[in-house]
Amino acid sequence: MPAIEFKNVSKTFHGLRGDFQALDDVNFQIEPGEFFGLLGPNGAGKTTLISILAGLARASKGQVRVMGHDVRADYAQARQSLGIVPQELVFDPFFSVRETLRIQSGYFGIHRNDAWIDELLTELGLADKADANMRQLSGGMKRRVLVAQALVHRPPVIVLDEPTAGVDVELRQTLWKFIARLNREGHTVLLTTHYLEEAEALCGRIAMLKSGRVVALDRTSSLLAGTAHTLLRFKTDAALPAALLPRARVTGRIVQLAARDAREVEELLTTLRVAQVDIEDLELGRTDLEEVFLTIMQGAQA
Amino acid sequence: MTPVVRRHALTGAGTLFRKEVLRFWKVSFQTVAAPVLTSVLYLLVFGHVLEDRVQVYPGVGYTTFLIPGLVMMSVLQNSFANTSSSLIQSKITGNLVFLLVSPLSHHAWFVAYVGAAMVRGLVVGLGVLVVTVWFAWPPFAQPLWVLVFAGLGSALLGTLGLIAGLWAEKFDQLAAFQNFIIMPMTFLSGVFYSVHSLPGFWQGISHLNPFFYMIDGFRQGFFGMGDVSPWLSFGVVGLSFVGVSALALSLLKSGYKIRS
């Protein structure tokens, strides 16, 4: 039985200015114990897909199951199996951290949960903030509380919707250490993130969404192996030749070009020399997930 | 981590109920003390001006007549305010998500939200009563009706607040609901007068206002007499509650304006 199953999921939003199809026939499964990444540009449908999983939105077509429970017909069981860390930094200003976690436990039918709440507070570095009001916490601390709230009912499946957006390095490390531990202990993790390095380091399998469709679905290692695997990186002040522009990744002075093999590297260098582009700090590296992501997103445009 | 956790279905609704009660209790100066003071001011001003000029029921002074109306008005307004302001705040700040991802059923939402609204309405009503009886002691002729109409009225307005809170997308819309529907219906229901003192046309209009039956039935409990039979009032208020509850439950079940 898959931990999460999306079957022919489509979602159309009906608005005053016409309909908008946010998801178009999405199909994939996540097995128990996987660390799975869901990637895609803004507006690709990631949050819509997660909202349907969590019961915040309803699919126009198709079925979604969590640990075998349909998210609509059997919503109580499905939601008991799921812990969601929402993207927005939301909180209830009336309560302290501990009250917030006790209330969330109660919603899931758990009356006495302080031992686990204390463990969560310690693991997430919140122990000294337990009695602080939510309003007094910094953004990073509020984010930690959101993670604790998602885990308070010990769900087998954990969904993190861009949990590290705008978060400092220390929290990112604490968070990943803790989530990795939960994953080792058997929890299934579904992660959406804009930090592709994180996805590459953490996720065993990745799905990429574009305009509501799954455009890639594979093991992270296979995705990395499947595209051009050498990355040519240099700095320049000059304009690139027109032939190279569509495939170049330019960040300020830094230019990155992907190549399949040594021969293609040579061709790229020749093109640059012929165009009389002066280059500095030339490096050759392995392609990263960002390169794979961009290649796939460009390919999927057609 | 041990995967075995004892879960109880009732704990969910009970938690939401307690959270909703705590929410207003933590700011009780604003949610309980302030409305009690407002009602006492009404009693002092109107009672002082009209005590010697108006007699609605034989042998009942105007201040005494006014007390049940003011108590009921506080019950109704505060029950409405509790559900509606809690829901719109949670929607606007986004923290409703914690409830939306929970396994609570729409019945649990309904019972918890309306239950907490009743507590707030009844606590404020009791506060108004405790303070105002120092000015005039009403006879409490049929106390059972007092309890029945206080309970039904707070439940009905708590449910209306739930509907308004789900419907409103901005504080502005909620204020419009409160100021253009709830307030006029409360004021024109006979809190400050008996509808029998009105011209025939306005008497007829008043009888179409369900708030009139709540106030009149409640007052029956104090004085043993009213403008209409308490059983008629009970029927109208009871049916209104069944109707708005059915609407509120169906809105919650369909996720109206809270699940896309």
Image (spheres, rainbow, N blue to C red):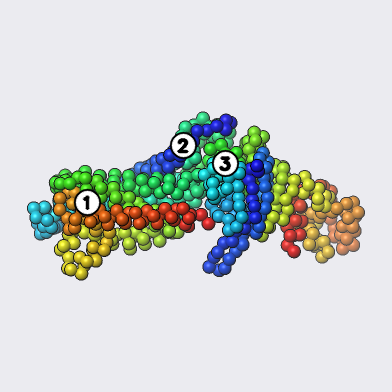
Image location of residue B153, percent across then percent down: 29, 52
Residue A36's label in the rendered image is none
Assign a secondary structure to mark 2.
Answer: loop
Q: Is residue A140 left or right of residue B124?
A: right
- Residue tagged by mark 2? B8
Mark 1 neighbour density, 10 Å: few (under 14) some (14–19) many (20 or more): many
Q: Which residue is mark 3?
A: A81
Q: CA distance from mark 1 to mark 3?
A: 48 Å
Front-most of residues A173 and A192:
A192
Which residue type does callout 2 highlight? His
> Is residue A280 visible to the viewer in this orientation of the structure?
no
Res B15 → quadrant:
top left
Query: Which chain letter matches label 1?
Result: B
Element at label 3: loop
Residue placed most toward the observer, B194 or A24: A24
Residue beneath disc 1: B218
Q: Amino acid at mark 3?
A: Ser
Image quadrant occupied by the C terminus of chain A: bottom right
Labels 2, 1: front one? 2
State left or right for residue A180 relative to residue A51.
right
Residue A150 position, x and y percent, is 55, 41
